[in-house]
Image (tube, grey):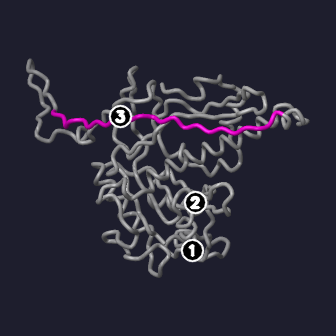
Amino acid sequence: MASSYSNIHPVDQILTSLAIESIPSDSQLIADQIFEKVNIPERSGTLLIENTRNFMGSPDLDLERAPGSSRPMIGSFDRTSLTYKAKIYSASDSIAMEDIFDSQYPGSEEARIIRKVARTMKLAKEKRAADLLFTAGNFAAGSKSDAAAITGGAGVKFNAAGAEPLSDLHIVKDLVFANSHGINPDTLVLGREVFRELARNPEMRGYVGDASKGVASGNLLLNDQAIIQVLQNVLGIPNVYVGAARRETAVPGATSSEGYIWTGDQIFMGIMKGSDSIVSKTGNVKAMPVTALDFEYKDMIAGQYDSLDLIRRYVWAEQVNEFKMIDSSFGFLVTDCL
């Protein structure tokens, strides 16, 4: 393994626990929930991907066996392969020794710093996940479309008059189903801006009502949980995530500028679960096809060390992983929804 902080400085288990520990704003981070994780023993290796057509039967094969005869052999479609290489991601910050000595709470300064460093690492990981699933260039031509251009759809953006986002997403679901040879998509990821716009959409609101309270169906402005429930129930997709995390996009010293990590007006639908991966000792992996996977060599670790002149204490965190597109035809990206 290439040289890294963890090779040079020992891991601190307490700081590592603090780095991994969730803080309230971490609830908006969804990358680890979306991607199936493959724990790999080596940083790089080969992934062998099963062909789903091998699980659709052999129509020309007569499975009836006469007494004494050999068992019929089924044919197979070839596996495909690709390589992966997990990358090392690190961040650190420091504090003057005087500030540590002046603190009334021993260990509190290092704890504060590691939470800041860990938050930077977590946001960066979230950005890498979003860049993979929310970048149109990562998808084949038949696995992406602007909202208004979905074939057979309403022909308008999801916040326009006459928009039927549920009907349009049903079309997308059928496309994923066909491209994956009969597997229903299990994951829906929405940018927060389009997600909140769905609360105002008449088609969405038409599925919510409470006659016992005198509220007619379609007269409610939907809250977040109601939107998620409608999407789950109507589309039949169990895992619905909203990309609500924000990050600073300006460099230190410049005027503050924030933005959503997951592009606000985009939606991803696809198959992200069920890879059933098998990892060999050498790092090679066999898996069923999904849209993408998270190859993780090392979860987040953390530590600290002092400068040689004992003027500053450095606190660091590190993780090693790669988000990898496996088969973009098992997913679909809807862009320009608003």
The amino acid type found where label 2 is placed reads Tyr
Give the total number of marks visible in the rendering: 3
Where residue 145 sits, quadrant-wise, is: bottom left
Q: Looking at the picture, does residue 260 appear above or below residue 5? A: below
Image coordinates for residue 226, horizontal then vertical, percent: 59, 63
Task: Identify which residue, 79 or 259, lies in the foreground.
Answer: 259
Task: Identify which residue, 265 or 71, lies in the foreground.
Answer: 265
Image coordinates for residue 307, horizontal then vertical, percent: 72, 29
For disc 1, the marked residue is 200
Q: Residues within 10 Å of mark 2 (few under 14, many from 20)?
A: some
Q: Looking at the picture, does residue 61 appear above or below residue 212? A: above
Image coordinates for residue 126, horizontal then vertical, percent: 55, 48
The amino acid type found where label 1 is placed reads Arg
Please report the residue visible at 54 percent of the width from the left and 43 percent of the height from the top.
32
Please report the residue visible at 66 percent of the width from the left and 34 percent of the height from the top.
316
Q: Which mark is residue 260?
A: 2
For disc 3, the marked residue is 287
Q: What's drawn in magenta, residue-wise?
A: 75-97
User: Left or right of 113: which side holds 318?
Assistant: left
Disc 2, SS? strand
- How far separated are the C-alphas under marks 1 and 2? 21 Å
- How far separated are the C-alphas under marks 2 and 3? 32 Å
Please report the residue visible at 16 percent of the width from the left and 32 percent of the height from the top.
74
Residue 293 lies in the magenta-colored region: no
User: Left or right of 23: which side holds 150?
Assistant: left
Task: Identify which residue, 308 or 14, lies in the foreground.
Answer: 308
The amino acid type found where label 3 is placed reads Ala
Image coordinates for residue 238, horizontal then vertical, percent: 49, 51
Disc 1, SS? helix
Q: Looking at the picture, does residue 319 appear above or below residue 282? A: below
